[in-house]
Image (cartoon, helix red, strand yellow):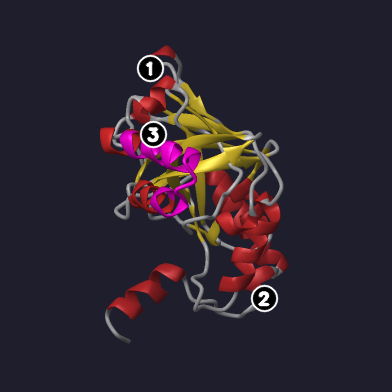
Amino acid sequence: MGNALRFLYGHCCKPSAAGDSDSLGPHGVSAATVGVSALAQDLFSFEITSKVDARAVADGDTVTVYVSTSDPRESCLVPQEVQIAALKRSEARAHRDYARADALHKSIVDAGYRVIPVHNEEVLARKYRIRLRGIDAPEGGMPYGNEAKEELAKIIQGKCLRVLVYGEDQYGRSVGDLYCNGLFVQELMLKKGMAWHYTAYDQRAELAKWEKSARAKRIGLWASPNPEEPWEWRKNKREGR
């Protein structure tokens, strides 16, 4: 997913402190129900203001985005070696030393950043892997795994995104709610029968309702009489079953 979003950028911003409002976000999220975040005030949001490339989609519940570091709240987090490499890369390109520029960009990418061309200028952007909060889609090796990935790509491709992040998982991914042109992406995936409600990590009642509706209509993965849960599939793979 190194070059997943070639034209994607946005801004990351911290919200007001949790005590300022009972509500931290849509769909029943509050200081009491935030659940997956260690602290409610960890919630942050950013807008993806350019069109999303379908290659951003790793699978049916994970998306890669790049956030511009031009905002002071992002720029203060950029490691010094990345800043230096970005400056040296720009100098190398100015001298048409493209081999050196490519080598420097590789070091930038390895550090979790990327230089992205946006509107005839280059932007240093930070890479975020977003794990869609509250759903679990079939893995690539499972029935409907490819269909789930394609459906998520179809939903976000060519659109603008809003991301609300509530925490981080054990793989370093940001766990958050994803909105596409104002539509709640997890809702769409559940209603289309392309994901399970991930009750082990999220107990929001509306997610359960959307899954139940898809089950009743037997659409998507629910067309199968007894589809295997992805968390059980992953467990069996780990145990060599």
Q: Is there a contact, CB below 8 Å, between mark 3 and mark 1? A: no
Q: Which residue is disc 2 drawn over?
A: 223
Q: Is there a contact, CB below 8 Å, between mark 3 and mark 2? A: no
Q: Main secondary structure of the magenta part?
A: helix
| Residue ID at (61%, 44%) | 7
Instruction: Give coordinates of residue 95: x percent, y percent.
Output: 47, 41
Q: Which residue is disc 3 drawn over?
A: 87
Would you say 38 lies left or right of 148 here? Answer: left
Residue type at mark 3?
Answer: Leu
Residue type at mark 2?
Answer: Ala
**Which residue is the extreme one toward the top?**
20
Q: Is residue 84 above or below residue 104?
A: above
Between marks 3 and 2, how big is the CA–CA gap?
54 Å
Q: Quadrant of the C terminus?
A: bottom left
**In this picture, which residue range is highlighted in magenta?**
84-101
Between marks 3 and 1, how big is the CA–CA gap?
35 Å
Q: Which residue is disc 1 drawn over?
A: 17
Give the mark toward the camera: 3 or 2.
Answer: 3
Towards the viewer: 185 or 216 = 185
Q: Quick one: label 3 or label 2, which is nearer the N terminus?
A: 3
Towards the viewer: 114 or 212 = 114
